Amino acid sequence: MSQADLAAALSVSRQTVISIESGRYLPSLPLAFGIARLFSIPVEEMFILEEVTE
Amino acid sequence: MTRSKYSRLLTPAVALLAGTGIACAVGIRQSWSAAIASEAIALIWATALYFWGRSDTDTGAVLSQQEDERQQLVGLKATQLALAAVIFAIVVVCLIAAASKYEIWPYQVLLVIIGIAYFVGMRAYGFDGDESGNGAAHSRLGFPKDQVPD
């Protein structure tokens, strides 16, 4: 699946897909669930929360 | 992301309308040749905005009202920066006007309008109440029924 296909399936822009892939943008919960649902895997497997230490 | 096929015309239409208003004011108070020049600039600007809005970029998406959630955030940050620049410019021009003994009330009116709009926005979009979060029926995403936090 290309970035453009994924963007079209999620109703977002190709730039947003690229930003999520590169970790520059954290998707909203509805979008995160939409991505996980599209790939038929649980959302916590699709996204890993990295603990940020200050 | 996609709203309607006419939504991409909104930004150019608003720019053209504002430009036409300015051109009319210039025509009435100054000269109609200056008004025609002003209208031509507005037309060129509106056309540029339309074609810019068709580009496959974040700016294009925001200009054509076709933005997704990330692009809305980008648009908001850009608007915030533009507003900060406008406020800074108003304050500088106001100081210059005051030092030159020109009237400063138009600048004060602008600053008051911006201030009022800010608090209206905070009131409209913010949430200051102590309403319980159990009203998940209003949202598309909520806690499972048996795991609603106290």
Image (cartoon, rainbow, N blue to C red):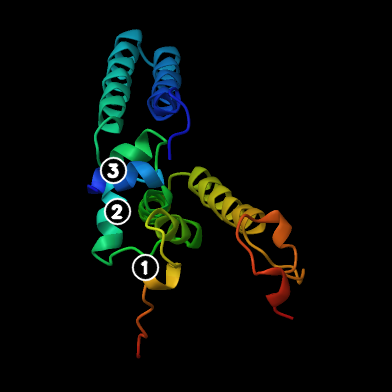
Residue B20 in the image: above or below residue B58: above
- Give me the residue at 28% from left, 21% from top: B47
Residue B38 lies, in percent from the top left, at: 31, 19
Residue B143 lies, in percent from the top left, at: 64, 69
Q: Quadrant of residue B7?
A: top left
- Give me the residue at 61% from left, 59% from top: B122
Q: Is residue B90 visible?
A: no
Amino acid of disc 2? Val
Query: Which SS class for mark 2?
Result: helix
Circles 3 and 2, Cβ within 8 Å, touching? The answer is no
Question: Which residue was labeled with disc 1?
Answer: A46
Closer to the camera in the image, B147 or B119 = B147
Pointer 2 or 1: first along the chain: 2
Q: Quadrant of residue A48?
A: bottom left
Q: Nearer the viewer, mark 2 or mark 1?
A: 1
Question: Which residue was labeled with disc 2?
Answer: A17
Query: Which SS class for mark 3?
Result: helix
Circles 1 and 3, Cβ within 8 Å, touching? The answer is no
The residue furthest bottom is A54
Q: Quadrant of residue B37?
A: top left
Pointer 1 or 3: first along the chain: 3
Residue A45 in the image: above or below residue A30: below
Question: Which residue was labeled with disc 3?
Answer: A5
